[in-house]
Image (tube, grey):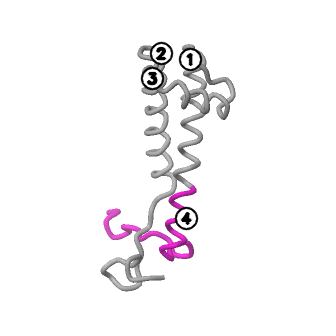
């Protein structure tokens, strides 16, 4: 595509690992939902946002079981979102057909 998507070595691309980015997004979103849920319980902050999330995540509410269900949904949602984002980045960077460089020489 453009020069901003190529690394310094010609012909290579900056490849994102979809599962790694998905795992990072999953943990970040689940912890964020957990924190926001506790803020909602303790301080009453973020109740409108939690209501929207409760309409999206089946079983999520401001109880201990509901928060656990919401965190599970957030893990799945964050993982899927991270995988899709990494896949899109790799396609726009021209890495979809190219496999990431392996360190075969360093496997000794």
Task: Answer above or below: position of 71 versus 89.
Answer: above
State yes or no: discs 2 and 1 in contact (Cβ < 8 Å). yes
Viewer-proximal residue among 29 and 54: 54
> Which of the marked residues, 2 or 1, is nearer the chain's N terminus?
2
Q: Residues within 10 Å of mark 4 (few under 14, many from 20)?
A: some
On the picture, is 24 further left or further right than 50?
Answer: left
Identify the disc placed on residue 41: 2
Nearer the observer: mark 2 or 3; the answer is 3
In the picture of the structure, the residue carrying the numbered disc 1 is 62
Q: Residues under labels 3 and 4: Cα distance?
A: 34 Å
Q: Is-magenta flag for residue 98? A: yes
Task: Please report the bounds of the magenta region as a residue range.
Answer: 84-108
> Which of the marked residues, 2 or 4, is nearer the chain's N terminus?
2
The picture quadrant where one finds residue 77 is top right
Identify the disc placed on residue 88: 4
Which residue is at a point 44% across and 20% down the rendered structure image?
38
Which residue is at a point 32% across and 63% down the rendered structure image?
108
Q: Residues under labels 2 and 1: Cα distance?
A: 7 Å
SS state under label 2: helix
On the picture, is 63 further left or further right than 15?
Answer: right
Q: How many marks?
A: 4
Q: Is-magenta flag for residue 66? A: no
> Which of the marked residues, 3 or 4, is nearer the chain's N terminus?
3
Q: Residues under labels 2 and 4: Cα distance?
A: 37 Å
Which residue is at a point 49% across and 31% down the rendered structure image?
33
Q: Position of residue 60 (x, y in %)?
A: 62, 24
In the picture of the structure, the residue carrying the numbered disc 3 is 45
Q: Position of residue 35 (x, y in %)?
A: 42, 26
SS state under label 3: loop
SS state under label 4: helix
Task: Answer above or below: position of 100 versus 70.
Answer: below
């Amino acid at each position: 595509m453009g020069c901003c998507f190529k690394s310094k070595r010609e012909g290579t691309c900056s490849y994102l690992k979809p599962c790694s980015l998905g795992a990072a997004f999953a943990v970040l979103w689940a912890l964020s939902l957990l924190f926001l849920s506790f803020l909602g319980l303790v301080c009453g902050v973020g109740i409108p946002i939690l209501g929207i999330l409760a309409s999206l995540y089946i079983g999520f509410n401001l109880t201990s079981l509901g928060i656990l269900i919401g965190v599970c949904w957030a893990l799945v949602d964050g993982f899927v979102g991270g995988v899709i984002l990494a896949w899109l980045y790799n396609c726009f960077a021209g890495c979809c057909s190219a496999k990431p460089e392996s360190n075969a020489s360093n496997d000794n």
